[in-house]
Amino acid sequence: MRDADPRTLDRARRGDPTAFEQLVREYQADVYRFAWHLTRDRELAADVTQDAFLRAFRFLDGFRGDRKFGSWLFSITRNCAMDSLRARRFPLVRDGDHEVEGAVSDATSHAVLDEALRSISHEHRETFLLVEVFGLSYQEAADVLAVATGTVKSRMFRARQALCAAIAEDESVSGDAAEGSGHGRRR
Amino acid sequence: MNCDRAQLALSARMDGEYVGGRRGIDVDSHVEGCAVCLAFLEGSARVRTAVRIRPADPVPDLVDHIVASLEQSPPLERAATIAPRHGAPLRRAMPVAAALVAGAVIGSVIVGGPFRGRDHEAISAQAVAQGVRAASPDLDSFQGTYEIVERGLSPDVPERRLQMRVAFLPPQRFRLEVDDRTAYPSAAWTPTDITYVEDMPATYRSGPTGCPSGLPADACPTTRATVMTTSPYSPAAPLPADLVVPLRTIGSARGIRVLGREQAGDREVVHVEATFDRAAPMFPFLRLGGTWRPFFGGDRVELLLDAESWLPVRITVFPADGMRRRDWELRFGLPVEEPNTAILDVRATSIEAGEPDPSLFEIPGWEGEILDIASLAERLGYRPVTPTFTGSLELATTLAPPEGVGAPRSLLVYTDGLDYLRVGERPGRLAGRAFGPVGPDATRVTLPGGGVAYLEPAADGLGRRLAILGNDTSLFLETNLPLKGLLAIAGSMPVRGLPAVSP
């Protein structure tokens, strides 16, 4: 994950609204996507994004600069997402859950992958997203999740195992169905 | 070495962690002879590919919402000052007349600026956005001619050549004409000849109907009806404006990439890159009827702006690269298009000195009436509310739009060059926060001077919008000004905005 320009950060810390707007422009897409992956609800993700930036702005003085700004912002986003889900009484996705209650399904998404992602545990999914989708290093992901890097490493391995198994199972089911109906599978 | 340990190491290695030395050798030798671990490796690689090539989920533009919320949070309130962009009574410190613009660009435009392989001098996206924004109110008039080359419409018509003329005269008068000069293979093809006129508040369009989506152009009926439409009031932003000054495309630095300054002929130009979706306002002619090839949202648009006047002098579209583009080509039955071959090239060939003839902007058959504000007040039975501060914008038009549910009863349009502000009003207290172009999801903001308003960012052909819901009247403001300018003007409205009540 890229890091924010230290001069922009410094100006934002001193209360320069243009600098903070620049940070919002740079990070809003990633923050929104992460929030959406955590909540599976577009409206909630937009609220979480807004809350995350507001909190980041309020606590910017407390950002020590010993980690990347993006990782710090992701930690805040994660906390905001948890708070929002709790406030709305949406259960967090746990093992075996296939949907977040009240979530908006995304009809255009890559269905198999999405289904597989939903089928893995919440801890494995958020770790996988941070590392594989958002490109964080193990150390950065560990900072966001407040866990040890070894935990990130083992969660990534378990997430991959589970995703491989889920996709293989889907292919095997689709293959059987296609064989049974006499039609090849479209890709 | 067991499978779990090997796969843990393989997974870490995929993520850039170092797995070497004795352990690395052990892992590699285990995997070589282990079908389960090989399947894990292959499956993980497939998952990675699937994750990385999947279409990006759409991300709403939340910047305006967030910045508006921030401006109300205590730390920013202390630091920020909402200042109008223009000094109030000062008008045009640096007037730019059409003749000057013409002199600035005409020499190099006709030569045609080569695009690639030249030295770039760095310039920030923000500096370009500021330059474009500053040019918008300073433009007195404009008329230019462009050559359009389109490639890939159909195997029978691999290349088309069209000429386009664009004219602008304040306040908010535009004319765009396309003259199709293509030699078609048969009379079954209808040339894409288009005329579009906008003379606020009315618009007029004449041209052939487009071919239904998915059909090749020569599959359409031989004779297609010519469509003529005259609209009494359009809420959309002026359609051809970005061809004159690309305010909607480049007025914000978001989503544009500035490659730098470069020399084109004897002129300096600024080279900008954006996606087709981002640069869509640069291609108003594609939305005015006729037949055009399809474009992929991620296609690369290269834009050359004259470094002095910020006029777009060349706009070229290149196919994007990658799997999503290939899927899209399959869907449209297109051949694979090379990323380095332009599929649309719009090049300014002349910018003419002098003001365009005002008769060019007459709308055929339009008999609408534009009233002064006193006559409008008499007709409506109330005097429309006006802002006490408008920067350099001046009242250009007042009108009473046709009655409709949720429509404003009066509309005032302020302009300065290409900058505009529309103020719509409907007497009475509205339920909910939606009014005119402001939707129910608008964000609540506090106005300078007190009161609340509901803000929506620019999108869908509309500028930034703000609804102020007063006790006995409701207002909306829609503009292409920056957020701070909009808030400064809104803060000067003599109506105190109240929180929305549930519909």
Image (spheres, coloured by chain):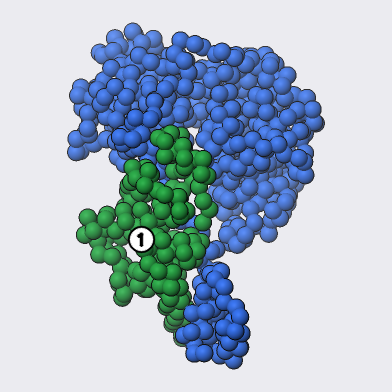
Q: Quadrant of residue B80?
A: top left
Q: Quadrant of residue B478?
A: top left
Q: Position of residue B3 (x, y in %)?
A: 49, 88
- In the displayed structure, would residue B5 be above or below residue B345? below
Q: Note the chain letter of the green one.
A: A
Q: Position of residue B499 (x, y in %)?
A: 22, 32
Q: Position of residue A101 (x, y in %)?
A: 26, 63
Between B66 and A62, the one lying in front of the other is: A62
- In the displayed structure, would residue B104 be above or below residue B215? above
Q: Chain of mark 1?
A: A
Left or right position of A83 against B193:
left
The residue at 65%/21% (across/down) is B143
Q: Dot 1: few (<14), some (14–19), or many (≥20) neighbours within 10 Å?
A: many
Q: For the view shown, which residue lies furthest in the bottom direction?
A: B33
Q: Position of residue B102 (x, y in %)?
A: 70, 20
The residue at 67%/37% (across/down) is B122
The residue at 45%/79% (across/down) is A161
The residue at 53%/64% (across/down) is B52
State how many labels appear.
1
Which amino acid, by three-letter code, is at mark 1? Leu
Badge 1 marks a residue whose secondary structure is: helix
Q: For mark 1, what is the residue?
A: A38
Q: Which quarter of the rendered picture does the C terminus of chain A lie within?
A: bottom right
Q: Quadrant of residue B469?
A: top left
Task: State whether residue B438 appears in this view.
Answer: no
- In the displayed structure, would residue B247 be above or below residue A138? above
Q: Note the chain letter of the blue one.
A: B
Between B339 and B3, the one lying in front of the other is: B3
